[in-house]
Amino acid sequence: MVQVKQILLKDNIQAREPNKDDFIQNTVEVNESNIPDDKVLVRLVDVSVDPYLRGRMSLGKSYIEPFKPNEPILSGCVAKIEKVGKNVTNFAAGDYVAAMLPWQEKAVVSVGKDWVKVDPKMAPLPSFLSLLGMTGLTAFHGLMEIGEPKAGETLVVSAGSGAVGSVVGQIGKILGLRVVGIAGSEDKIKFMVNELKFDAGINYKSPHYKEELAAACPKGVDVYFENVGGEVSDAVWPLLNFKARIPLCGVISAYNKSADIGPRLQIPLLKTSSKMQGFIVFNYADKNPQAIKQLSQWLKEGKIKDKHTVNQGFDKIVPSFLSLFNSNHLGKMVIEISKD
Amino acid sequence: MVQVKQILLKDNIQAREPNKDDFIQNTVEVNESNIPDDKVLVRLVDVSVDPYLRGRMSLGKSYIEPFKPNEPILSGCVAKIEKVGKNVTNFAAGDYVAAMLPWQEKAVVSVGKDWVKVDPKMAPLPSFLSLLGMTGLTAFHGLMEIGEPKAGETLVVSAGSGAVGSVVGQIGKILGLRVVGIAGSEDKIKFMVNELKFDAGINYKSPHYKEELAAACPKGVDVYFENVGGEVSDAVWPLLNFKARIPLCGVISAYNKSADIGPRLQIPLLKTSSKMQGFIVFNYADKNPQAIKQLSQWLKEGKIKDKHTVNQGFDKIVPSFLSLFNSNHLGKMVIEISKD
């Protein structure tokens, strides 16, 4: 028996910002010596926190079931398999996997259908949560399948310095588009322009935000990759070109609100014959192998950067998650739980 | 020389309902005896009025240029060609055409590239403005190209008793969908259910509109054909199924407003991986021949009804147009100007 920490959701969180009191940290016992035949013992190595988890903390119909009170929260993690039950044949002790796992240092769990064995020689382990994992695939599929990017067009991406946006913009540059990133601090703007090589970075907190965005898009906007919503995006609609495409990936400005009121979208979409389409990465799971191949190649060739903000230790999971709504982190937020 | 009536736009109309003082009725002289070599003399037979014309009366960037002050208003018309200039070879005196023409009883005009010769033996002339013309093609292309209807799914159409909506719903029935029409009067509801054979008709003026709409869509909404916008449509968003499609054809509730404020659309589209796409019928012009063939066949087989509300006389053009925003007309509004 070993004592390990776990984090539970205290209760479903309705229209407000979450805080540390919404989570319960427990200690539970894990029986390491007697693994049931069809289960495995995993140890968390890296934990990913993402804004979409906020949605699962609310109640209500969505593309994915809400977390339940007093049950563990799950997120994308890299874990090491320490032991396997007799009937488990597709994984072995010593393997690393990228999987949806509970926030618990060690756990005895069933193998999920969507677990992916990852090779630590191919890329640093946190990359399997970012560029080669959920956020990189989200960026790739959303841009390619819905955004239909064409060289010479203008791509605007909100939260352009974040885990998804930073990849969207870099793919846009590789494909020959003009890329304009939107973010909320000067550090993020510098990161987008200097490190990621976006053509422009616009601070939505500027008093002249609308004018600056318009000036950065002299030929209008052909693709708007939506991560934010609210007033940040309202400034984009008047700039849409004919037949613009809007992959709708996230709406972080609305996750903590009970109602999201603003200009309705029908008129700008109608006037320009534009398309807005919501998606989740799982919709395109059949195309993951090609996407990972392409992203790995760009990473190897130095054409794309995989930026992480890494915090250390299990106790940083909740604060890292909470900071997503107000933080100045760059790229993908990862919490390193254990190292070999 | 002959004296004929014409109607001009007095000035661009900003955010308000148009009224009769926005239009100037003139008398102009037309030289019937001396047609320039590359022009034709046309006589209006039927004039179409449609809500989208309101958009062209405003200023501002859109998919089509605004009408100019003191210039004639154009709309879809059926006209008879009375004389042709020497160099006109594709039309002859006596031909009927469906064309965008000025509101002027007779006119000497150039032949447009998009003029279509119509055969009065094939269908009644007003049908070339409705089912076999712009509104029928709008319904067909929007539903087929963006709505991607599948048998067994639920299709909701707003303004379901109107020129476009009545065709959308009937095509939905032919294809085996459950069809729910939304409209604003009991006469329109009866028309949709009894004459067009929709499965249900919902009155958005009912105090229990939201509940009634939800009850009419027990399996949720797979396709929402959007003609109206505003609160009428806000009631549809909570009913969207996973991967719903929303062809965005018109927003009549917003045409007379300076701002259209309400719940933003990102959250419902994101939660359901749904798509909203604006369009105009011209985007699919290359597919008109097949569409007209299919619609004519359904008309001949009695599977689809082409309902007109016909007003008589040139002086009814403006009142008919104005009534679109408040009227109780059914199907396509047509003004009959002259008969043979």
Image (tube, coloured by chain):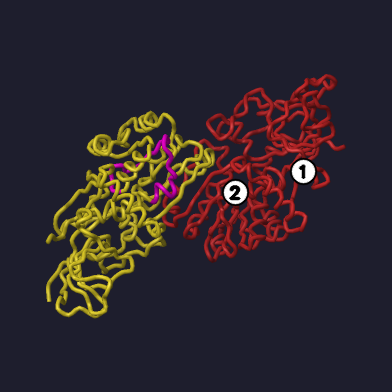
Chain colours: A yellow, B red
Q: Which mark is residue B126?
A: 1
Q: Quadrant of the N terminus of chain A?
A: bottom left
**What percent of the width, then of the height, locates residue A182?**
33, 38
Residue drawn where x is 58% and y is 50% of the image: B145
What residue occupies the far right of the structure in this picture? B340
Camera-side residue of B203 and B247: B247
Task: Please state which of the two labelled residues, at mark 2 or mark 1, is closer to the viewer.
Answer: 2
Q: Report the Cα–Cα distance between label 2 and label 1.
A: 21 Å
Camera-side residue of B260 and B339: B339
Q: Is B191 left or right of A31, judged from the image as shown?
A: right
How crowded pointer 1 is (Cα within 10 Å; few <14, some 14-19, many 20+) is rated as: many
In magenta, the rendered stretch is A141-163
Magenta span has A113? no
**What percent of the width, then of the height, locates residue B264?**
44, 47
Which chain is disc 1 placed on? B
Q: Quadrant of residue B224?
A: bottom right
Q: Which residue is mark 2?
A: B142
**What percent of the width, then of the height, locates residue A145?**
43, 50
Q: B19 above or below B156?
A: above
Which chain is disc 2 placed on? B
Q: Is B51 left or right of B128, judged from the image as shown?
A: left
Residue B107 can be seen in this image? no
Camera-side residue of B76 and B151: B151
Q: Amino acid at mark 1?
A: Pro
